[in-house]
Image (cartoon, coloured by chain):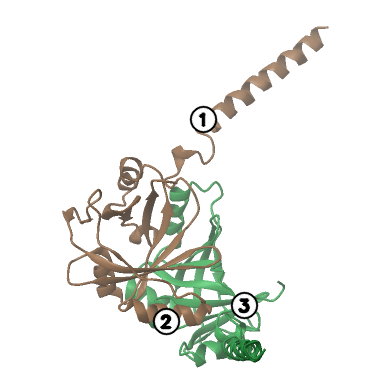
Chain colours: A green, B brown
């Protein structure tokens, strides 16, 4: 009887210790919002800077046999989200074209004029190349820009369009690629 | 009766003309294999060169809150597909890590040693950056490498692993990014 009691006692102790370990180990839970920066794992966009958007479109149309040629729009800032580049107002403009593939959008970007921008700086330094990958977020300015900056990835360029805003975060050194935070207000 | 006959005749003519137009317009069909280079629109991979793969993994683990740290493997060529760089045999090696996101795999690549490779050349020139995007194909060497070369995108590096091979095509200038052709023999 004493032996049984001892065994029972040791089982209770084991249970208590295991519970304590579990409590400490899973206090925050695995991969909750608290221990990650991006809220989701979906890369919605690959942004590519090119010196001539029409030539770039020609090449992608040929590569993928696109039946409909992508249209070109102009990113020129928006009154609600005036373009800022490295903390200063910017008149930067770029021609944009979006190519839908099965699982991701390829965005071609041709910087326009001489106004400095992250697009132009990147194209000048690297030539035609992948500038960023894009991820959708909510509360871009209030939540994610601060989160990125805390993690060592400062905001380099910010702007918007009718119904949305974007921020390019300087994560090139750490992640090997700039992250574009994208917010679509209506979604 | 003559009127009816005329009407019938004109309808037949209209049908003939329309058929002829259709025959000419859709001779090749829209977006068949004949007027595109890549066989599919799925970007399976974004390849990123980094100077230190463990540091790169640290940053991605933090960014996405990965519960399982990606393992590091070594790409060192394969006897069935010995590594070739710019037409010459190469002993190039690289450390690789694969990070699965919802819709695409992010491949981190750390070139090893001093042997020249497309990875090392790219990292030396651009620093940490997106090196390629990958697309799966069948008949890589016999079909797609020649197709790319005809289109002005030469093969720069070719190699393989147990069960597959890859080819990096120099499409940086035209498309703004290197395309990696990937073939998994078993799939």
For the residues beneath circles 1 and 2, the answer to whether they share a chain is yes
Q: Hey, which quadrant is residue B86 in on the image?
A: bottom left
The answer to which of B147 and A173 lies nearer the viewer is A173
Q: Residue beneath label 2, please?
A: B58
In terms of secondary structure, where does tag 3 sit?
loop
Q: What is the x, y in percent for residue B66?
A: 51, 76
Drawn side of residue A161 relative to residue A148, left or right:
right
Q: Residue beneath label 3, please?
A: A137
For the residues beneath circles 3 and 1, the answer to whether they share a chain is no
> Dot 2 falls on which chain?
B
Q: Which of marks 1 and 2 is nearer the N terminus?
A: 1
In terms of secondary structure, where does tag 2 sit?
helix
Tell me the crowding category of disc 1: few under 14, some 14 to 19, or many 20 or more residues within 10 angstroms, Cα based.
Answer: few
Q: Residue beneath label 1, please?
A: B27
For the residues beneath circles 3 and 2, the answer to whether they share a chain is no
Residue furthest right in the image: B1
Mark 3 near mark 1, Cβ–Cβ under 8 Å? no
Regarding residue A1, the answer to whether it shows in the image is yes
The residue mark sitting in front, 3 or 2, is 2
The Cα–Cα distance between marks 3 and 1, rounded to whole angstroms, is 46 Å
Drawn side of residue B5 relative to residue B140, left or right:
right
The Cα–Cα distance between marks 1 and 2, rounded to whole angstroms, is 54 Å
Identify which residue is drawn at 32% across, 46% down: B145
The Cα–Cα distance between marks 3 and 2, rounded to whole angstroms, is 22 Å
Mark 1 near mark 2, Cβ–Cβ under 8 Å? no
Identify which residue is drawn at 49% across, 77% down: A179
Q: What is the x, y in percent for residue B11?
A: 72, 19
> Dot 1 falls on which chain?
B
The answer to which of B94 and A183 lies nearer the viewer is B94
Mark carried by residue B122:
none
């Amino acid at each position: 009887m004493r032996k049984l009691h001892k065994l029972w006692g040791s089982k209770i102790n084991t249970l208590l210790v295991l519970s304590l370990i579990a409590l400490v180990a899973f206090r925050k839970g695995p991969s909750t919002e608290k221990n990650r920066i991006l809220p989701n794992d979906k890369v919605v966009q690959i942004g590519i800077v090119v010196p001539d958007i029409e030539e770039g479109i020609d090449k992608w149309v040929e590569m993928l046999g696109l039946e409909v040629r992508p249209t070109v729009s102009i990113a020129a800032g928006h009154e609600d989200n005036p373009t800022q580049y490295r903390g200063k107002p910017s008149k930067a403009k770029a021609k944009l074209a979006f190519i839908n593939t099965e699982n991701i959008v390829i965005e071609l970007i041709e910087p326009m004029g001489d106004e400095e921008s992250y697009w132009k700086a990147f194209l000048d330094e690297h030539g035609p190349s992948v500038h960023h990958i894009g991820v959708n977020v909510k509360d871009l300015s209030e939540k994610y820009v601060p989160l990125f900056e805390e993690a060592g990835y400062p905001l380099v360029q910010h702007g918007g369009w009718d119904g949305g805003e974007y921020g390019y975060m300087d994560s090139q050194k750490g992640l090997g690629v700039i992250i574009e935070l994208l917010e679509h207000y209506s979604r």
